[in-house]
Image: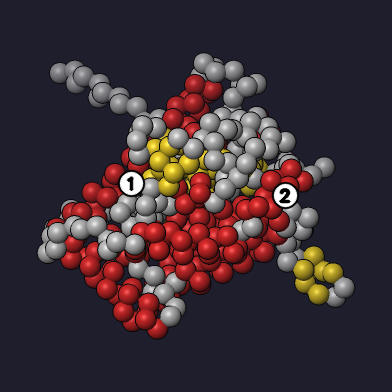
Amino acid sequence: MTAPRTKVAIACQSGGSQTAFTAGALRRILRDPGFDRDYEVVALSGTSGGALCCLLAWYGLLVHADEREDYVNVRGRDARGRGARAADLLTTFWNENSAHTWWDLLVTNPFIVGLHRMVDAGVLPAAPPAPGVPAMVRDRLQRLLERLVPFEELPALLAAVPDHPTLLCGAVDVLSGDFAVFEEACPDPEWRRERRKSAPPAVTVDTILASAAVPPLLPAIPIGDGLYWDGLFAHNPPIRGLVERDASMRPDEIWVLQIDPETTPAPPATVVATVDRRFELSSNLSLNAELHWIRQINQWVDQGVLPAERFKTIRTARVPLSAALAERLDLASKVDRSPAYLRELMTDGEHQAEAFLSDRGDPDAIWWDPMFPHRYRPKAAVVS
């Protein structure tokens, strides 16, 4: 009798260019021999650059849904599974998104990164980008996404493959302050894929652009009655939405691909380091709050407060940037698109995911968060 596969949701934090790390980690997970055999990815959740990576992996798994056997031999050749094919989309995106023209590589990219560093150091005041630049950046990103993901074909594809993973992308409404989660690229932030066969009434690339709209570099994206910015200000990435659905779609494990480090080896000693650390802490606020919510549910299930037949405990793991690389990165590196730098990030992601997958069976491995909330327990009174 075949053992049931572990249901896994992968949540990808925002990070601009640093989400090349996320792409590397996803590539290693998607190419793992255990993919589609030992575990089933039931959801991909992301914000900003994490949402872009999730979209590409999600579409790759969706369009290659009939290729679920990895490394099978067909007519004497090795036919790769759908995970490996989905990984190819991530590689293509980051190759094309890098600074590969001579002008971009030698002039534009170094200028933008240097300008951000001077602003972070307080040498220059923060200023809006030149007129027309945000629209140009948005249009370039939209063209690249639409070339890789045919959004007009998604409705029929989603209906044809009802057991595909769910896609969740976080954003925030600039006007109302409401947190938004766009599922399956549906422009209605209230729509939820509550069951496997649920299909969105419409899809659009605007939902992905909204999650990636980092002000002031990218303009806010109008969708319906809302005006949306990067989900960094809301869900980074969406976690709660991963469990608010039919029991067959709830994950047993949530793997967080984390860009911004939780800890730092020493207090920041410069203005740039202080700005960077403030951003890291604020970036992790929503992530830690939502993971605490998962742990609280686990505790209530364990205590019998919630019925076990309707709820289940969920393990959560974090796959972060390696400490050595994280210590070298600053806030301005989130806009760096130099090919060597992006390759370094992707390689680090692959190595970190490799280490996590090899340790995954050990519940005491460093990757796993506690199952239950930390509780303050006062020391017993000392009896003299």
User: Relative to residue 300, is residue 322 drawn left or right?
Assistant: left
- Residue found 18% across the figure and 61% down from its top: 119
Q: Nearer the viewer, residue 331 or 177?
A: 177
On the image, the x and y values in percent for residue 294 come to 47, 32
The colour mode here is: secondary structure
- Which residue type does callout 2 highlight? Leu
- Residue found 68% across the figure and 38% down from its top: 199
Q: Quadrant of residue 354?
A: bottom right
Q: Quadrant of residue 167?
A: top right
Report the residue marked by disc 1: 283
On the image, the x and y values in percent for residue 363 come to 52, 43
User: Relative to residue 355, is residue 66 drawn left or right?
Assistant: right
The correct choice, above or below, for 239 with respect to 283 in the image is above
Which quadrant of the rendered structure holds the N terminus? top right
Whether residue 37 is visible, yes or no, is no
Q: Quadrant of residue 247?
A: top right
On the image, the x and y values in percent for residue 380 come to 25, 21
Q: Residues within 10 Å of mark 1 (few under 14, many from 20)?
A: many
**Counting residues from the N terminus, which is met first, the one under dot 2 or under dot 1?**
2
Report the residue marked by disc 2: 157
On the image, the x and y values in percent for residue 256 come to 48, 47
Whether residue 126 is visible, yes or no, is yes
- Between circles 2 and 1, the one closer to the viewer is 2
Mark 1 residue element: helix
